[in-house]
Image (spheres, grey):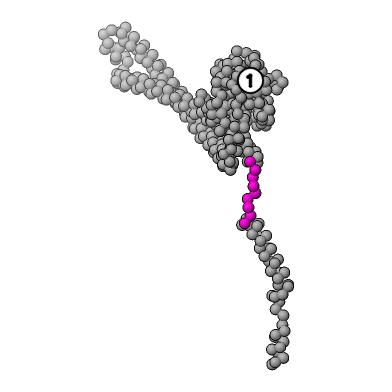
Amino acid sequence: MAAHRKHRKTRRNPFSGPAARTAGSLALAGAATATAFNGTGHAEPTVTPAQIKARVDRLYEEAEAATESYNGARERTEAARESLDRLREEAARRTDRLNTTRNALGSIATAQYRAAGMDPGLRLALTSDPDEYLERASLAQRTVERQAANVAEAQRELAEIDRVRAEAGQRTAELKARQAELNRHKDTVRRKLSDAERLLGKLTAAERAAYDGGAAPQPAALPAATAPTVRAARAVAYAHGALGKPYVWGATGPGSYDCSGLTQAAWRAAGVSLPRTSYAQISAGQRISRSDLAPGDLVFFYSGVSHVGLYIGDGRMIHAPRPGADVRIAPIDQMPFAGAARPA
């Protein structure tokens, strides 16, 4: 019994000693590693102002691309709505004509009903003036012919009304699809701009001011270069008059503009109608090389042709840059150049 107690006293505890301390250290290290990977106690990487600005620039570029898609979708939506309105007006006009024809048929039918019970020979025998009867008979014949023509016209109107209503149904479906597309682009623009504002909120007041004023407008003096045509000169003059007005996506003036809204308004003032979007404006007029640029030409940027400005000479343009930035003068080297066009 004593030997047994002595044996128990000398038994080594496997959870004590150097080995246990080593295992405990490894366990603590593993727990710390696991905590770091789980996100607890792991500090968010510091984002520099330069990184924030780069991300914001990218978001603004994406927002502008979505804005131009929105502008195109809005144009298509308006066209679908106008087409539907025209079809509804046509259906109303044809329905009025059909009702007029029906009324005429009703009058003829009433007159025929009143005289239907008497034999034509008897009517001739009873009349005191045979010439008058024959004249009436001729008139009756013409009435029958007119009735047949009215029936044919009514049938044509019914067929046309059915056609117009079917086409109006198609236009209604198209309008709904366009409106859904419009809302998708609108949501994308708003989301991109919201993300940009969130990132800009991480900048100090001084850093934000530096970013917003990083491309401050130059003095609004007329460029030394001369516009090649009177219309181009008018477009340039209009753009100068818009300096300092705010960028608002989807706006076409006169109080605010987006990029293609400004160029469209400038050339409209010169008597030239341009498409609404930048990616359509590049095909309006003559495509020209960068070396042939003249004041009034349209200059386009980014691979998706999502931005446009109005060239004013000396390597500069007037453009509406982005939300938070007013219409201003800027070098065309400020963004990736995609092409140029000279409106007719």
Who is closer to the viewer here, 196 or 273?
196
Task: Check the image and report above or below for 212 versus 41.
Answer: above
**Horizontal relation, residue 217 to residue 138: left or right:** right
Count of number-bearing discs: 1
Magenta region includes residue 221: no
**Horizontal relation, residue 104 to residue 280: left or right:** left
Q: Quadrant of the N terminus?
A: bottom right
**Residue 171: x, y in percent?**
51, 31
Q: Quadrant of residue 231?
A: top right
Q: Quadrant of residue 309?
A: top right
Who is closer to the viewer here, 287 or 224?
224
- Give the labeled residue for mark 1: 312
Task: Check the image and report above or below for 309 versus 55.
Answer: above
Q: Secondary structure at mark 1?
A: strand
Magenta region includes residue 42: yes
Going by the numbered disc 1, the residue's amino acid type is: Ile
Give, as a single range, the part of the protein colored magenta: 41-49
Q: Is residue 275 visible?
A: no
Q: Is residue 308 visible?
A: yes
Q: Residue furthest bottom?
A: 1
Q: Quadrant of residue 67?
A: top right
**Residue 18: x, y in percent?**
73, 73
- At 66% from the left and 63% from the top, the residue drawn is 31
- At 58% from the left and 23% from the top, the residue drawn is 263
Magenta segment, prevailing SS (helix, strand or loop): loop
Q: Quadrant of the C terminus?
A: top right
Who is closer to the viewer here, 47 or 343?
47
